[in-house]
Image (cartoon, grey):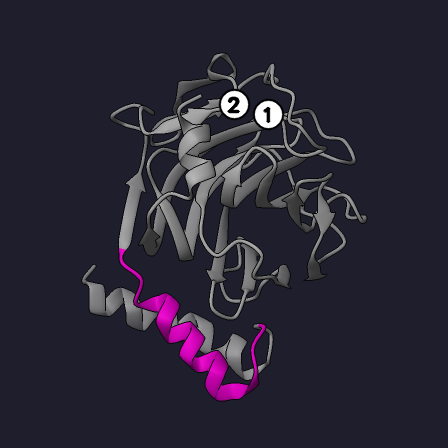
Amino acid sequence: MSTSLRRTLYLFLLLPLIERGCCPGHGHEAKAAEAEKLAALPVIVNEDFEAGADRWQPTDPKAWKLVDSRHGKAYSLFQQSKYQPPHRSPLNIALLKDIAVSDLVLEADVLSTIKDYGHRDMCVIFGYQDRAHFYYVHFGKQADDHANQIFIVDGAARKKISTRSTAGTPWDDKWHHVKLTRDAETGAIAVYFDDVATPVMTAADKTFVAGRVGLGSFDDIGDWDNVVLRGKRLPLPPAAESDQAK
C-alpha cells in the first residue's frame, strides 16, 4: 500500500471520530489538524519477529521467547519477569532499543494466554524515560482506578490519567488488535481495541514529550506480533539512554 493511500485510509477512519468530538483537542479544526499530522507520520518499525527479537530489551530476557504462531513467529511473554520496579508499575516490559518518539501511532496484534480472571491484562508502554518515568496503557479485563486505564509513572506509584475508559477489555483466547496514538504538542492520547475508529480510552498529558515504546503486561502473560510504529523520532532522553545500557 502506498504512503498516500495509507494516509487517506487513516484519515477516513479518524474523521467520524473527529466529527463526534471523541479526540482530545480544541475544536473541529484542531482535531482535524491533529488527525492529519498523525496520519502523515512515517513508519519507523515494522516488526513481525520473523528475523528474531534482537531490537527489543526486556526487563527480564528469560521471561520472553519467540514462538510459532498463526502466521509465523510471535514474541511471547511466557512467564513472570524477575524484575522489581522502583515504584508500583508493570513488571513485564520489552522496550524497543535506540528509538524514542514524540508523536506516535503504535499498532500491534496481541494474544492473552493467561487463564481468564478479573484483572487479566496486557500493556503498551510509551514516553519511557527510565524505570521510574513513563506512560502505559493497561488493557484490563475489569476496569477500576488501577485497571483498564491510561497511567503515568512519574517518580511514584502509577497514577490514572485517563479521562475516558470502558467497563473492561473483553479478553478471550483469540488474537486482538490494539492501537495507540499520541500527539505530543497537545498531549492527546487515544487507545483502541479491535475497533480502530472509536477509542476505548483517552487522556491528555504533556509530562513526557518523547520517549521509548514497549510491550508487555502488568503481571500476566501473552504473545505479541505485527508491531508497526509510526512516529516523529527524537534523540533518546539521557535517562533512557543510560537505562538502556543496563
Residue 24: image x %, image y %?
58, 73
Which residue type does callout 2 highlight?
Thr
Query: Can you identify the residue that label 1 sits on?
Result: 221
- The quarter holding residue 104 reads bottom left
Furthest toward the front, the residue is 238
Between discs 2 and 1, the one toward the N terminus = 2
Location of mark 2 (residue): 59
Q: Quadrant of the N terminus?
A: bottom left
Image height check: is 84 above or below 239?
above
Q: Residue 164: tell me if it is visible.
A: no
Q: Is mark 2 in CB contact (under 8 Å) with mark 1?
A: no
How far apart are the two marked residues, 2 and 1, measured between alpha carbons? 14 Å
Question: In this orientation, which residue lies closer to the viewer: 31 or 212?
Answer: 212
Asked if residue 32 is among those painted magenta in the image, a careful observer would answer yes
Question: Circle 1 — which element?
Answer: loop
Q: Which residue is drawn at the image coordinates 81% and 48% (left, top)?
A: 144
Horizontal and vertical percent position of residue 13: 43, 70
User: What range is drawn magenta here?
Assistant: 24-42
For the point 34% across and 32% down, the residue is 71
Q: Answer above or below: position of 142 versus 65.
A: below
Q: Quadrant of the C terminus?
A: top left
Left or right of 83: which side holds 102?
A: left
Q: Secondary structure at mark 2?
A: loop
